[in-house]
Amino acid sequence: MPARAGLRILVSGASGFIGTELVRQLEAEGHTVLRLVRSKPKSPSEVHWSPSTGELDRTVLGTVDAVINLSGASTGRIPWTKAYRRVILSSRIDTTRTLAAAISAATHPPTVFLCGSAIGYYGDRPGEQLTEQSPKGTGYFPDVVGAWEAAAQAVPKITRVVTFRTGVVVGRGGAFTPLIPLTRFGLGSRFGSGRQNWSWISLHDEAAAIRHLLVSKLSGPVNLTGPTPATSGQVTSYLAKRMRRPYVFRIPGWVITTFLGDAGRDLLLTSQNVAPDRLVADGFEFTHRTVESAIDAMLARP
């Protein structure tokens, strides 16, 4: 379901891993994208903001049809010290609250607010199939995501809010930033048992699903994950096979948690089999239906 052409869309995190692909697809579809930036704007398509202080020209919000929030500090930065844990939380809450406040203050608020979220909401749930109806998990990251989603709801009723819970994005960035070079050097490894579910989605389908949500009638949480499950062992072993590199190492779970702490457990050892039930029921069609096809597409791109 492509979005109708000609929308004006304000995007935070537009220069990031997902944002770059999303903006490319939006502009190819004929939309006008305004990018939120923290530095001095260098073109008419850039809008200054400072989420740490709540600064954002609220008149801009009266000129756009939709807002897409992709901002948030990387969870891949390790270690998760107490100070960086606060950064992970505040970078999500401050940006979302700033956008929600600006939307609420707009004379003509946008009709759609799509706010990034994460399947970290569910926590470690081995043996379960998780849908949008599943309750929040327990622990640090489920609490972060829960607060993040709650902050997105503080907008007028006229604005439809979707919190899209993204899985492991298969592309040249994110979780694959370390995996690709490690595999290239023959250090591709199985993490723990390798049997934990990694709910994935290709970078192309992540952006396409966000575009779909622009014109969907869905609101509330929507899982952005691929239609077929995969384990971490399947992901890492196929990556090595596809890159024609050896796959002989296994890193025990205790080693990961000893050296990486909670970040290692939450990022590498947590098991989440998250189904995209609402997205599929709404008619979204995946380009990459298996993690193997997603990895093939990733490696085919420069």
Image (spheres, grey):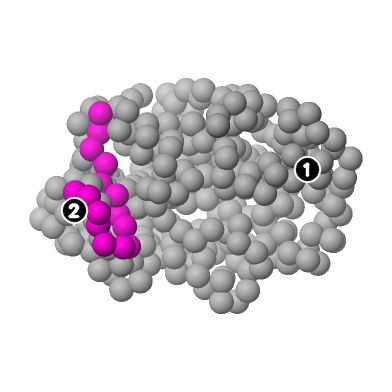
Tell me which corner region of the image, top left, top right, bottom left or bottom right, holds residue 186: top right
Q: For the view shown, which residue lies furthest in the right direction? A: 248
Image spot of residue 182 (x, y percent): 74, 46
Asked whether 40 falls inside the magenta stretch, the response is yes
Q: For the view shown, which residue lies furthest in the bottom direction? A: 83
Look at label 2 and name its amino acid: Leu
Kindly identify the residue that appears in the image at 70 percent across and 44 percent down: 181
Asked whether 158 falls inside the magenta stretch, the response is no
Q: Main secondary structure of the magenta part?
A: loop
Kindly identify the residue that appears in the image at 72 percent across and 59 percent down: 264
Kindly identify which numbered label has been placed on residue 199.
none
Kindly identify which numbered label has been placed on residue 61.
2
Q: Mark 1 points at which residue?
A: 185
Q: For the view shown, which residue lies furthest in the left direction? A: 107
Q: Give the quadrant of the N terminus.
A: top left
Cα–Cα gap, marks 2 and 1: 47 Å
Contact? badges 2 and 1 (CB < 8 Å): no
Q: Nearer the viewer, mark 2 or mark 1?
A: 1
Q: Give the quadrant of the C terminus.
A: top right
Q: Which of 91 and 46 is in front in this view?
A: 46
Is residue 176 found left or right of 196 in the rendered image?
left
Tell me which corner region of the image, top left, top right, bottom left or bottom right, holds residue 262: bottom right
Q: Which of marks 2 and 1 is nearer the N terminus?
A: 2
Is residue 153 found left or right of 260 in the rendered image?
left
In this view of the protein, can residue 110 be seen by the observer? no
Kindly identify the residue that appears in the image at 56 percent across and 45 percent down: 173
Kindly identify the residue that appears in the image at 78 percent across and 39 percent down: 233
Highlighted magenta segment, given as a residue range: 30-44
Q: Which of 188 and 128 is in front in this view?
A: 188
Is residue 21 found left or right of 50 in the rendered image?
right
